[in-house]
Image (cartoon, grey):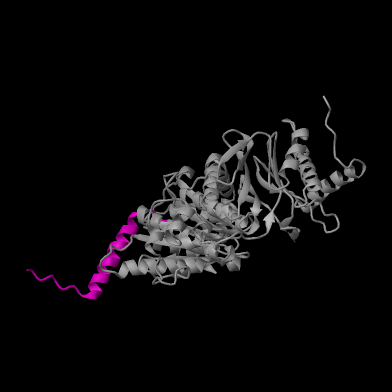
Amino acid sequence: MEANPRSTGRLPAAFLTPGSSSFLDFLSAYSPELLPSHRKLPEGVLDAPHGTTIVAVTFDGGVVLAGDRRATMGNMIAQRDMEKVFPADEYSAVAIAGTAGLAVEMVKLFQLELEHFEKVEGATLSLEGKANRLSTMIRGNLGMAMQGLAVVPLFAGWDEGKGKGRIFSYDVTGGRSEEQGYAATGSGSIFARGSMKKLYSPDLTEHQATTLVVQALYDAADDDSATGGPDMARRIYPLVTVITEEGFRRLTEAESSELARSVTERRLTQPDGPRAALL
Amino acid sequence: MSTPFYVSPQQAMADRAEYARKGIARGRSLVVLQYTDGIVFVGENPSRALHKFSEIYDRIGFAAAGKYNEYENLRIGGVRYADLRGYTYDRDDVTARGLANVYAQTLGTIFSSAGEKPYEVELVVAEVGDEPEGDQIYRLPHDGSIVDEHGSVAVGGNAEQISSFLDQRHRDGMSLAEALKLAVQALSRDTNGSEREIPAERLEVAVLDRTRPQQRKFKRIVGRQLSRLLQADNAAVTKTDEPSDEVPEE
């Protein structure tokens, strides 16, 4: 088979050995060089494109996960239309901040890990199980994180058992914590979190939640140069996804442009955004 | 020291083939049919958990008759092969033809190596295309050969009889309900020609549906959806029975 030029054409023994349902375990036994965590790194600190701000909010009936579109390299804009939110499977999604190249590879592996488990076992992992797998993958990346190639995701999904949307955030060592209500990661996260703190309430509707994340990303872009705001001229809007009982859905371009337009329009008269009550 | 008996290579291979065939024949048959929107897998399987059909990749499905532990091993091997290939290259580069080749090589090597027990399995690897013309169905007998099938295929105990029954009645462009009804009809025929009833809860049904919006086209049909389809074809028996019987006479 082509994936292994040394073999006679027969599936190598590693493929037919019963055992793990994890694609990562299989890969690290059979072809460890394909795993990012098994690669040797040159000395020194690398400069590579970084993804910036991602945010998540729960609402009554699901969870919203969104990200801005900018990738930066130092003080340069490396990419204007980067996508940082990906479906992990039908009922969960992962958004990434940090070293873009590694993060996208990690997401690809994570998606495959969930799909592989589902195919081999004939059942899906629990939401906690998925969150823990992602934790393991980030922990495997610690060596690279030490050299400036950190990947810090947010994971959100619909918990079938509990009947609600949940958010998990991670630190660079793979430490996992569940967030109540809202979360943000990345360079503009301080501003986004402040914005969400003032705007969030537990009884949001889906539409209010999607508006809230766009407001938060707008505030992040307002104060953090690495976060990109809605780019009306180039028609590049924040990427907004919604996960409910029905599964993962990415807002269409028409929907996200409408959201971005309504938020931007209000900011023309009120540049700092909606005001919260003082007391 | 005693001298081992001489067994001619022809005899040795014939014995191994006989052994494998007998093992496969002990299992229940299953059928794989093309219908207008894809490919349907139908088999009699009293177990809800131990599947005969499974998803390998986006457009590729797997069916097996014979010994469970052996085909389960091959199935997992296939999933690993497909996922590794899709990860190394691209999702579009995983094809049923490639997978069938790997299976054929594996079965063939095991079959002809004297040190190993031949696998008592017969596999079907199917890939659904964007159009019915793009559908591919490969049958992989125990000895490592590949048969490129069109329209319908049966494997397992009573395969020959079921195949000829299907060949006469299967036609292109059948609806899912029609194809399902034909498959159940074919499976209900016993070796001696008598028919028996297979209740819906003993049926395992899965489809590769090209109209599914998701990237992954494999879907199991269970519970209410299955009984609805089976009932739909009961109501349509009078309509669909005649054309499907006419086809062989033409």
- Locate residue A157 relative to residue B123 in the image: left or right: right
Quadrant hosting residue B118: bottom left
Q: Position of residue A144 (x, y in %)?
A: 56, 55
Q: Spot the residue most to the left.
A: B1
Dominant secondary structure of the residues highlighted in magenta in the image: helix
User: Residue, x 42% and y 44% (percent of image)?
Assistant: B47
Quadrant hosting residue B231: top right
User: Which quadrant is home to the N terminus of chain B?
Assistant: bottom left
Against B146, residue A107 (above or below) is above
- Locate residue B7 relative to residue B122 in the image: left or right: left
* Residue B85 shows in the view: yes
As for residue B6 lying within the magenta part, the answer is yes
Q: Which residues are magenta?
A: B1-29
- Tell me how many marks there are: 0
- Locate residue B158 relative to residue B243 in the image: left or right: left
User: Which quadrant is home to the C terminus of chain B?
Assistant: bottom right
Q: Nearer the viewer, residue B163 or A187?
A: A187
- Locate residue B22 relative to residue B55 in the image: left or right: left
As for residue B245 lying within the magenta part, the answer is no
